[in-house]
Image (cartoon, rainbow, N blue to C red):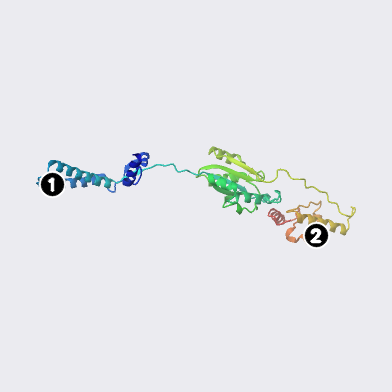
Amino acid sequence: MERVAEAVATFLFKYPLHLFRRGDLSLAPAFSPALIAAGLGAGLLLLLLALRGVRTATPARDRALLGALRALAYLVLALCLLRPVLLLSSAVPQRNVLGILLDDSRSMRLADLAGMSRLDAVRRVFGDSAGSLTRQLGDRFVLRFFRFAADAGPLGTANGLVGSGTRTNLAAALDAARQELSGVPLAGMVLVTDGADNSGGDLTAPLLALRGRKVPVYTVGVGQERFARDLAIEVPPAPLEAVMSHEVWDSVYDRLAELARQHRTSLVFVNTRRLAERVCRHLSERLGSAAVAAHHGSLAKEARLDAERRLGRGRAR
């Protein structure tokens, strides 16, 4: 019987009965209720006046039945004009946002993960939308990526990382991400970096602001915690004397150039300014003038700053 009632309700009212039990009936009339009532009253009055002068031999029972049908027709017309609606409320699941902050400093280019750089490892884990970790996080949260180094900003995908930052400012990164996500339901932040803050910023303020919003911060370390010892003593092939020959100096310059080619950046310390200029000249002949720069107190301020910028941007070897 219940199935029959459900089928009849669906046929007549488009929706089954259980929806009517869950929802609330309301009216959404196309015209004001007072105007509808006035129109129906005027129509009923005209009908009574028209029937008043009608004389018929119809039995009283039939007249009562016809009157009831007319009244029912008026009620159906009034119901249609009032436009009844069924209001259903349902909970729409809301997906929280997860902020992922990725370190984009130069140290991320170090290849200490089985021949893979730290940057490549981050790209592989967070850059592939089909990867297991990204897919699992994406099923539960809306992922918003940020890059950070000396400054911070939004990032489309992890594949956009280049590893060109000169500093790591964790405070600025957290604060920028917090402000960017201030108007969304934030489930947490994931901070992916290979080292500590070296900008001198204070982490207290951004962490307290996130704590006030009850937003947890998770840290993920990238790279090896301990490095193998990379220390060696280089001795020229010829015996050391108070005054070295040109052949010995050439072997020293050749070895310095070879070591410089094996590393990303190298610093050579000497005990005089004159020797600094001489070593710079000989290494420039072997590595190219664009890859070598001298730095000492007798140089002009602009020359020293240029050498520091070239070293900081990875142009000097």
Residue at 62% x, 45% y is: 192
Q: Picture quarter containing residue 37?
A: top left
Q: What residue type is labelled 1?
A: Leu
Q: In which quarter of the image is the N terminus?
A: top left
Could you tell me which secondary element the residue under label 1 belongs to? helix
Q: Position of residue 156 (x, y in %)?
A: 56, 52
Q: Position of residue 26 (x, y in %)?
A: 32, 42
Residue at horizontal 54 percent and vertical 37 percent from the top: 212
Pointer 1: what residue?
A: 51
**Label 2 sits on what residue type?**
His
Q: Between residue 117 and residue 313, name the one nearer to us.
A: 117
- Specify few, some or many for label 1: CA neighbours under 10 Å numbering under 14, 14-19, or 20 or more: few
Q: In which quarter of the image is the C terminus?
A: bottom right
206 and 111: which is toward the camera:
111
Label 2 element class: helix
What residue is shown with label 2?
A: 282
The residue lying furthest to the front in this view is 1
Query: Horizontal and vertical percent for residue 155?
Result: 57, 51
- The front one of 233 and 39 is 39
Residue 3: percent from the left, percent from the top? 35, 41
Pick the front one: 216 or 174: 216
Q: In this view, does 280 lie to the left or right of 312?
A: right
Residue located at (83% from left, 56% from top): 252
